[in-house]
Amino acid sequence: MSFFRSVKYILSYLIIAVSIFSCGGRSTPAPVSNIYNANTFGERNKAAIKTSQYIVKKGETLYSIAWRSSSDVRSIAQLNKISPPYKIYPGQKLFLIEPKVKKSAQASKNKVPHKKSTKSSTENSQNSNKNTLASTKKQAYGKNVSARKSYQNSTLTSESFSQKISRWQWPIKGKVVEYFSNREQGNKGIDITGRRGSKIKATAKGKVVYAGSALRGYGKLIIIKHNDDYLSAYAHNDRILVKEQQQINRGDVISTMGDTEANKVMLHFEIRFRGKSVNPLKYLPK
């Protein structure tokens, strides 16, 4: 009888030991992480604009609207015929997606023109060939420079080329507690913990295109334009130390770490390439 009792006690101790070991094996408490993801990521994702049109609210810039809609600011500006520096005003209606062309308008464009005589068609064809040959000869001998420059400029600004950042730097030293995710409801950047009031620095040279707290889920936010392709964002700041349109250099202090609209003191950092979220760890030095 005592033998079976001893075996029973041993089995009980083993079960308790396994349970303690399993709980102690976690590097971070799963329940807290889950709550954090649900609250913080959810708030940021709720701020996303998914409509084809948008009415500008007070405190917003074209860059902040492009950020929320995951769009390239140049596309929205072109669609709404807004020139740099992209000034907008509260109550203004913006198209975020090109409106559909009405069938009647499209049909009128597609009307078949009246047939011309064979003679006139032949003459037009011959004239066109002569003009093409003349233009080709001019280009071959270095003439028609303006046309060639125009072509080169359009090629350089096409999406086949991207403007590189010569060097990125970490915005702050700290522990990365949340990583980038491609999932629809995932984290669109990285989250770095630290002490309240720690100095946050610009990760590359650029211009401040947004500084405020109008974006839900980001708290006090700064967005920096580095060139026409790349933007970076710094969220949940305690104090913002820069102003919109301010030129800054890599390493300049732009804010202090805080927990505005977050469950803990941290920096949420993002990089966008032509409006789309990319993994910051692929750009930041190892």
Image (tube, grey):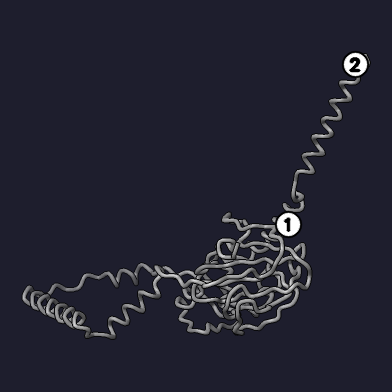
Tell me the crowding category of disc 2: few under 14, some 14 to 19, or many 20 or more residues within 10 angstroms, Cα based. few
| Residue type of the residue flagged with mark 2 | Phe
Nearest-to-viewer mark from 1 and 2: 2
Q: Residue furthest front?
A: 286
Q: Is residue 223 left or right of residue 3?
A: left
Q: Quadrant of the N terminus?
A: top right
Q: Is residue 125 left or right of residue 11?
A: left
Give the x, y percent position of residue 143: 22, 85
Q: Is residue 38 left or right of residue 105?
A: right
> 115 and 175: which one is in front?
175
Answer with mark 1 or mark 2, whichever residue precedes in sequence.
2
Query: Which mark, residue 252?
Result: none
| Residue type of the residue flagged with mark 1 | Tyr
Q: Residue at x 59, y 79 (%)?
A: 209
Q: Which residue is mark 1?
A: 36
* Residue 14 found in image quarter: top right
Depicted 128 relative to depicted 186: above or below = below
> 76 and 265: which one is in front?
265
Give the x, y percent position of residue 212: 68, 77
Q: CA distance from mark 1 to mark 2?
A: 50 Å
Tell me the crowding category of disc 1: few under 14, some 14 to 19, or many 20 or more residues within 10 angstroms, Cα based. some
Q: Quadrant of the C terminus?
A: bottom right
Give the x, y percent position of residue 72: 50, 71
Q: Which residue is mark 2?
A: 3
> 237 and 59: which one is in front?
237
What SS does tag 2 mark? helix
Q: Residue at x 42, y 68 (%)?
A: 100
What SS does tag 1 mark? helix
Q: Residue at x 19, y 79 (%)?
A: 140
Depicted 89 relative to depicted 276: above or below = below
